[in-house]
Amino acid sequence: MPTEVPVQGHVEPGFERVRVEFEKNFSERREVGAAFAVYHRGQKVVDLWGGYRDKARTQPWGEDTVTTVFSSTKGVAALVLAVAHSRGLFAWDAPVADYWPEFASAGKGAVTVRQVLGHQAGLSAIDEPLDTEILADFERLAAILAKQPPAWAAGTRTGYHAISLGWYQTELLRRVDPEGRSIGQFLREEIAGPLGLDFHIGLPPTFPEDRIARMIAMNPIRALLAPKHPYTVPRRMMFQMLRRRSLTARSFANPPMRGAGGIQSRAMREVEIPSANGMGTARSLARLYSVFATGGEELALEKQTLDDLMAVPPPPSGGVRDLVLHTDMSFSLGFSRPAFAYDFASSPAAFGTPGAGGSFAFADPDARIAMAYVMNQMGHYLVDDPREKALRDATYRALARLGPGH
């Protein structure tokens, strides 16, 4: 095994400690391969990558290496919908059925867009078995989604829509977009293309395999023995995952992805799972969130849409304990929000999404900053993975040292 881990990239003056923490991730925190990027006031101030694309540590992580970011994909899907909202294609508080009449079945006629995006619609689990053939057929998938009955009354509780959320988002977009595009297509044509982003929901069949980092599953024993932390994977959640008919297990198990391995099959990469199978670079994620952290001019975003994204969400009427994750969480318009023990930014106006294993990307408009961390060694924290948090904290300390004039 190599004794030195290759770390490349650059940091602007004042952000040197961020690079130190990035290097410490490899020497002290079991990192294998990763990248981290930060934009401040629209300018890239941190762009680091290092380690290896594979478990054997034989393939160096390159400048253009992409990796699966799991639920950090949700934030990208939510940003896509924010662009559509800014163009007047739908309203947050309108019933979904106003745009997608079939959705009204099984008692869902009054469920609003805001409730779906806030994980409050009771649709975290899909009962009919799904596979890549169904996922590639938007019409067939839409019919399955429309008939799904909710597990609780919309607006009363949150329950993390771990996999299902992105499909409801993409069908809503297909119904309101004049060209009927999916999340992945809209992202490619309206956002990633104009901004020059290397991020994909539905990987192109011709994408080079040697640019892809292989995910490395977390060690379940290490997860069970982990020291107490507010956001290690809750033991109740882990036990519920073992009960096949529990809401938690059903919310994560359809389609079967078999941990880190299944989602890495070529067939699973090429379909659109806008909640889970996004692939890209940390640089592109941070660049995208930076547009939303600095006023949205590059995507011609309306101020009202940005204000809506930053607004502090009211809690559901039945309490903040998530029925799927079994911990207190706050969600709004497709994003995780700073709340409770998870206070990830400088103010409550921030928004982003963490991903299974440790990835995270977010915008902090009050600080005019955006950052993203991606990796291939999966950790056992829901949020605040120590590797990512060390980089985030170092970035905020750097900003504090630089002062308000920077």
Image (cartoon, grey):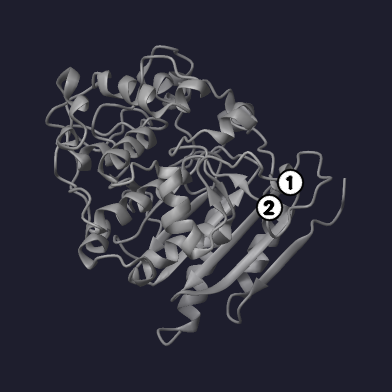
Is 244 situated above or below 164? above
Q: Is residue 372 left or right of residue 74?
A: right
- The percent coordinates of residue 190 (x first, y second) are 41, 56
Is 143 situated above or below 401? above
- The percent coordinates of residue 256 (x first, y second) are 52, 20
For residue 57, say whether it is visible.
yes
Quarter holding residue 104: top left
- The percent coordinates of residue 168 (x first, y second) are 32, 34
Q: Nearer the viewer, residue 391 or 341?
A: 391
- The percent coordinates of residue 291 (x first, y second) are 40, 67
In the rendered image, the quadrant that contains the N terminus is top right
Of all residues, the one furthest to the bottom in this rendering is: 405
What's the residue type where badge 1 is placed? Arg
Q: Is residue 247 left or right of residue 313?
A: right
Give the residue drawn at x 52%, y 33%: 271
Quarter holding residue 19: bottom right
Give the residue drawn at x 38%, y 50%: 342
Give the residue drawn at x 37%, y 43%: 181
CA–CA distance between discs 1 and 2?
8 Å
Residue contact between numbered discs 1 and 2, judged by CB atoms under 8 Å: yes
Considering the numbered disc 2 on the image, is that residue within a helix, a strand or a loop? loop
Mark positioned earlier in the residue sequence (1 or 2): 1
For residue 255, say whether it is visible.
no
Considering the numbered disc 1 on the image, is that residue within a helix, a strand or a loop? loop
Q: How many marks?
A: 2
Is 21 situated above or below 132? below
Instruction: Give the residue at mark 1.
Output: 53
What's the residue type where badge 2 is placed? Thr
Q: Nearer the viewer, residue 205 or 18?
A: 205
Give the residue drawn at x 44%, y 84%: 403
Instruction: Give the residue at mark 2.
Output: 65
